[in-house]
Amino acid sequence: MGVGKTAVGTELAKLTDRELVDLDSIIEDRSGTDIPSVFREHGEDYFRRLESSLMEDYLTSGRGVILSCGGGIVISERNRQLLAKHAEVVWLEQDIDVCLERVQSGSRPLLDREDSSDFARELYEKRKPLYKQAADVVINRSDKDIETTAREIYDMLKNS
């Protein structure tokens, strides 16, 4: 959420000559509506099932894509197991206040509430151990532009 995963993923895709697959974009394409509408019309459980199913399809396809997942993907133990088995997982770490400055609550269904900043902080702290558990590589985005971040990921993964 607001860490720049799509922008970094796009740059990394150029460096690696791989396809970037953004799960949120795939969900929007298939549902014919945006993510907030999917949440409103079908609920978070539906969204998480769809997101998990798509992730599994891409991870097990053997296509070697760069997969951009939403922050909630790590909630599911099964998802974490699939990621561990089929992917090299990069956690783009960023101070939550910086992330909150970058996003508008209306575009983030879980933040469409009056206490969105407090809720985002709570959510981040709850998910943080899961991010650490799932990550093969942790990249701190503080003071790094998109290109530098992508190059750092590329170099780390190339040497792993």
Image: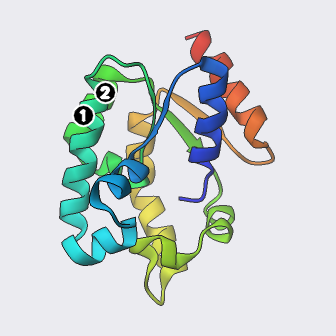
- Residue placed at 63% from the left, 62% from the top? 99
Q: Which mark is residue 85?
A: none
Asked which quadrant contains residue 88, the reply is top left
Question: Measured from the top left, where is residue 141 in percent x and y?
Answer: 70, 44
Q: Which sits in the foreground, 23 or 105?
A: 23
- Residue drawn at 50 percent across, 79 percent down: 106
Give the answer, above or below, for where 92 lies relative to 122: above
Calculate the distance from the C-alpha at mark 2 to the C-alpha at mark 1. Answer: 5 Å
Is the C terminus in the top left, top right, bottom left or bottom right quadrant?
Answer: top right
Q: Which residue is mark 2?
A: 59
* Display coloring: rainbow
- Neighbor class of circle 1 (other Cα within 10 Å; few <14, some 14-19, many 20+) is some
Seen at 57% across and 17% down, the residue is 157
Q: Secondary structure at mark 2?
A: helix
Q: Is residue 157 above or below residue 71?
A: above
Q: Amino acid at mark 1?
A: Glu
Residue type at the position of mark 2: Leu
Q: Are marks 2 and 1 in contact (CB under 8 Å)?
A: yes
Left or right for 27, reference 66:
left
Identify the secondary structure beneath mark 1. helix
Judge whether residue 55 can be spotted in this image: yes
Instruction: Pinpoint residue 98: horizontal percent, then vertical percent.
Output: 69, 63
**Rendered position, 108 above or below 21:** below
Q: Nearer the viewer, residue 121 or 37?
A: 37
Residue under numbered circle 1: 56
Q: Which sits in the foreground, 140 or 38?
A: 38
Dot 2 crowding, Cα within 10 Å, few <14, some 14–19, many 20+? some
Expressed as whole percent of the image width and height from the top left, the position of residue 73 reads 34, 48
Identify the residue shown where x is 40% and y is 73%.
109
Res. 35 image quadrant: bottom left
Q: Is residue 62 above or below residue 142?
A: above
In this view, the residue in front, 81 or 112, is 112
